[in-house]
């Protein structure tokens, strides 16, 4: 399991700078298939059918609830686009990378 997936998100109320761009590249290298998208990071997951897609969406919702950090989801019949960024800082925080790693880890259980 990715080391980031073992971490816990920290509360973020703003007032801090987003993750420095020099740190984004190395953090992204530890995440398979994730890429920069606007102010955040994103990945599209593909599934065999709608049931698998919705099971994944529910699992992502559980991760988001547990971490108190919520993604933007775009859901189709057999795919789900997941995007993370920290609104309070107007860009990326470590929480975004932690949650991306936790979503990827869903496929390891």
Image (cartoon, grey):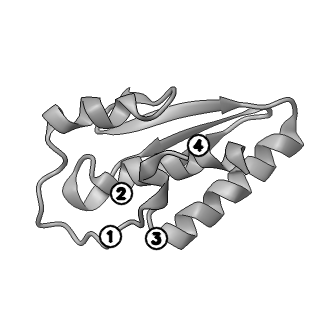
Residue 71 visible somewhere in the drawing: no
Quote the CA–CA distance across marks 1 and 2: 7 Å
**Where is mark 1, residue-wise?**
10
Ranked by sequence position, the earlier of labels 1 and 2 is: 1
Are the residues flagged by discs 1 and 2 in contact, CB closer than 8 Å? yes
Q: Position of residue 71 (x, y in %)?
A: 49, 52
Ranked by sequence position, the earlier of labels 3 and 2 is: 3
**Where is mark 3, residue-wise?**
68
Quote the CA–CA distance across marks 1 and 3: 9 Å
Q: Residue at x 35, y 48 (%)?
A: 85
* Side of 60 relative to 41 (left or right): right
Q: Position of residue 97 (x, y in %)?
A: 39, 47
Mark 4 surroundings within 10 Å by alpha-carbon count, few (fewer than 14), some (14 through 19), many (20 or more) = some
**Where is mark 4, residue-wise?**
104
Residue 50 visible somewhere in the drawing: yes
Quote the CA–CA distance across marks 4 and 3: 17 Å
Q: Nearer the viewer, residue 13 or 102?
A: 102
Mark 2 surroundings within 10 Å by alpha-carbon count, few (fewer than 14), some (14 through 19), many (20 or more) = many
Which element type, helix, strand or loop, lies under badge 3? loop
Q: Quadrant of residue 104?
A: top right
Q: Residue at x 25, y 35 (%)?
A: 24
Q: Residue at x 88, y 44 (%)?
A: 51
Which element type, helix, strand or loop, lies under badge 1? loop
* Side of 11 relative to 43 (left or right): left
Ranked by sequence position, the earlier of labels 4 and 3 is: 3
Q: Nearer the viewer, residue 19 or 73?
A: 19
**Where is mark 2, residue-wise?**
95
Q: Nearer the viewer, residue 4 or 71?
A: 4
Q: Position of residue 59 (x, y in %)?
A: 69, 57
């Amino acid at each position: 399991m990715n080391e980031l997936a073992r971490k816990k998100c920290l509360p973020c109320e703003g007032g801090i700078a987003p993750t420095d761009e020099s740190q984004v590249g190395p953090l992204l290298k530890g995440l398979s298939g994730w890429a920069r998208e606007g102010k955040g990071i994103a990945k599209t997951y593909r599934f065999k059918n709608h049931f698998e897609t919705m099971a994944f969406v529910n699992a992502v919702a559980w991760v988001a609830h547990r971490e108190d950090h919520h993604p933007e989801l775009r859901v189709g019949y057999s795919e789900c686009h997941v995007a993370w960024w920290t609104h309070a800082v107007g860009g990326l925080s470590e929480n975004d990378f932690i949650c991306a790693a936790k979503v990827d880890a869903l496929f390891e259980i």
